[in-house]
Image: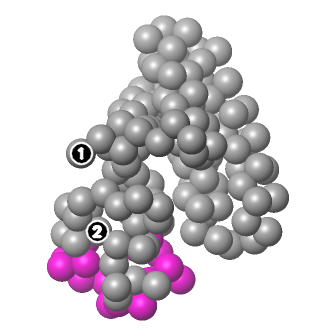
Amino acid sequence: MFMIEYNDIGWRYWLVTAVLLTVGVLGEPIGFVLAISLTVIQLIHFIYKEHSITSFPIQVRIWYLMLLLVALPEPMQLIFWIPCIGTWAQVIFGYCTMARFVSLFPWNRTELFSLELLIKTFFSRPVKGSIKQGFSAVE
């Protein structure tokens, strides 16, 4: 049930990001800025590691960063609750909602978009590694 992976650098990035977002939603807006900064660092690190800006882990981090940037203006900061809760779900249970959304983009799937695909995508158990590994039809 729990997917706590202390030895994984990606997991540690997400843990610190979740803590920083929690600081932000609890009233210290500097937490949001630090979470965005760490996400940029994480993105650069993974681009260097993956050697491809189009790899699935990079796509997830780019869209995650976009969500954080959309939420940054003060009137939009209520949105930070979404990545805060989602990042804690990723850190504790290995359930990454952003990866599931990104897996539905046309260039990340071979299966036709359908209600069945949506249900399978969002209600399947978390898998170690990429959500794409959990689906035989989604390449």
Task: State the residue at coordinates (36%, 44%).
Answer: 3
Task: State the residue at coordinates (72%, 55%).
Answer: 46
Residue lying furthest top: 27
Badge nearest the viewer, 2 or 1: 1
**Circle nearer the N terminus (2, 1):** 1
Q: Are marks 2 and 1 in contact (CB under 8 Å)?
A: no
- Whether residue 71 sits left or right of residue 104 in the image: it is right
What quarter of the picture does the N terminus occupy? top left
- Whether residue 119 sits left or right of residue 109 in the image: it is left
- Quadrant of res 34: top right
Q: Which mark is residue 129?
A: none
Q: Position of residue 30 (x, y in %)?
A: 64, 15
Question: Callout 2: few (<14), some (14-19), or many (20+) C-alpha neighbours within 10 Å?
Answer: many
Q: Which residue is nearer to you in this view: 97 or 13? A: 13
Q: Which mark is residue 121?
A: 2
Q: Secondary structure at mark 2?
A: helix
Q: Residue 14: tell me if it is visible.
A: no
Residue lying furthest front: 7
Answer whether residue 77 is magenta in the image.
Answer: no
Label 2 vs label 1: CA separation?
A: 18 Å
Q: Amino acid at mark 1?
A: Met
Q: Which residue is nearer to you in this view: 106 or 74? A: 106
Vertical placement of 89 versus 107: above or below? above
Q: Amino acid at mark 2?
A: Thr
What segment carries the magenta color?
103-118
Q: Secondary structure at mark 1?
A: loop
Q: Position of residue 92 (x, y in %)?
A: 36, 37
Vertical placement of 14 versus 60: above or below? above
Q: Position of residue 36 (x, y in %)?
A: 66, 34
Q: Which residue is nearer to you in this view: 70 or 11? A: 11
Q: Which mark is residue 1?
A: 1
